[in-house]
Image: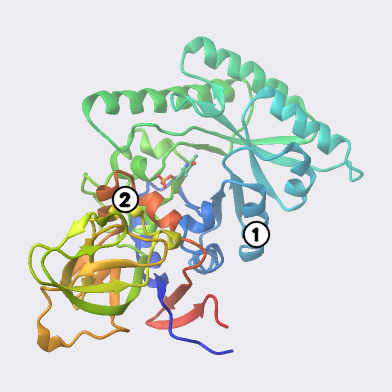
Amino acid sequence: MQNYRKRAWAEISLDALAENVRLIQEQLHPGTEFCAVVKADAYGHGEEFICKKLYNLGIRFYAVSSFEEAVRVRRWCPDGEILILGYTAPECAPVLAQEHIIQAILSEEYARELENYLENDPENNLKLKCHIKLDTGMGRIGLSAKSAQERQNVIEIMQKIHALKHLKIDGIFTHFSVADEPDSKNIAYTARQKRSIIRAAQMLQEKNIPLRHVHFLNSAGICYHNDSETGSDSTLARAGIIMYGLMPNSALAVPIPVKPVLSFYSRISHIKTIRPGDCISYGRTYKAEITRRIATVTIGYADGYPRALSNQGEMLVRGIRCPIVGRVCMDQTMIDISRIPEELEIQPGEIVTLSGQDGKASITADDIAGLCGTIGYEIVCGISKRIPRIFIENSRIIHEDHLI
Ligand SMILES: *Cc1c(COP(=O)(O)O)cnc(C)c1O
């Protein structure tokens, strides 16, 4: 196996991950367990090594979004709980039960479909743990539980589910929709969402339906809605984006000093001087007004480097910010390196930081997202398969993708 020089790569700091987990755990109330959200290939960071590290850190609750993710995470995390947050085809129910995976329940009909597949399975004593999803205002999935009337209805449905032979209700949960923008209206909305689920939990207790878990905190909830009065009612904190060191809302300071786990790098392939009037890239959207030094970087939108950064973004070379000129292409992008002193003698092969720290300068996925009108989540999840992830622990490479 030969390790050739890479055109672009992402470095994943498992040390930063460990520190972020520690900082977040410090913020949790005693009754709240850390639940690592590792869906979407651990937000593009690489599920296997993120999960193995979390497992070594003692994390024993994981959340994912699909059957395939859950079955894979079970390989990296042989014990502990794995919760599928959304829909799974009901045919999967027997495997879920065998693998001790918890399934979210989205509706009464869905519960019955799961029950049917479990009932008809040759292994007839299968039990599937489930967490009932309540829709308290997100409007995505779950049993509607906003009003007292709706909550009453939820209790009746849950009593029916409780009576099913193969489903075991282990908890209820809900998801916040505006926790990341805590202005007074949204604070009130989130507080109503919390009250709805806490009230539903009380009503279930009165009906003798025991719940091991009642949970509602996501990253924004942990940051902005984790007061000791109601935050402590969440038995799990479903930490996604802040665990990876990005912000639920990049316009707002996060009260936890987490650091980005992922850094993204590429290289310069070609350098030239252009004269006034010369144009760069498709559409000739950039035209030099004066003489400029232009470097081509081996990164493009096929790598998940957004085309929306055309004539907008910056990259770091030797700690100096270099603006993107012209349109981002599929595999290549041009930057203006005129600000870099000649005597530094930048050559093809030079490393370019797309996101990460370089000297005193840094660019985060949140910064990139801001320029593209999106959120940091979409940037890290969008880094494509073509980009090898290199995992670093104690300043050493412990794994590298795509060796050939
Ligand atoms: C993705 C997801 C989370 C994690 O969200 P973050 O904002 O990344 O913390 C938590 N709960 C549910 C239901 C989710 O779908």
> Marks 1 and 2, Cα distance to the nearest angstrom?
33 Å
Q: Is residue 355 visible?
A: no
Name the side, left or right, on which 137 lies relative to 48. Answer: left
Q: Is residue 319 above or below residue 22?
A: below
Q: Position of residue 259 (x, y in %)?
A: 30, 62
Task: Write down the residue under mark 2.
Answer: 308
Disc 2, SS: helix
| Residue under the point 65% across and 38% down | 130
Q: Quadrant of residue 252?
A: top left
| Residue under the point 21% across and 78% down | 272
Name which of mark 1 and mark 2 comes first in the sequence.
1
Mark 1 within 8 Å of ligand 1, using the beta carbon: no
Q: Nearer the viewer, residue 7 or 120?
A: 7
Whereabouts is ligand 1, in terms of quadrant? Answer: top left
Name the side, left or right, on which 291 lies relative to 128. Answer: left
Q: Is residue 6 above or below residue 305?
A: below
Q: Mark 1 belongs to which amino acid?
A: Arg
Q: Quadrant of the N terminus?
A: bottom right
Q: Quadrant of the C terminus?
A: bottom right
Q: Is residue 271 above or below residue 285?
A: below
Q: Nearer the viewer, residue 286 or 308?
A: 286
Q: Position of residue 211 (x, y in %)?
A: 59, 34
Q: Position of residue 212 (x, y in %)?
A: 58, 39
Q: Is residue 209 visible?
A: yes
Task: Write down the residue under mark 1.
Answer: 72
Name the side, left or right, on which 271 lies relative to 40. Answer: left
Disc 1, SS: helix
Colour mapping: rainbow
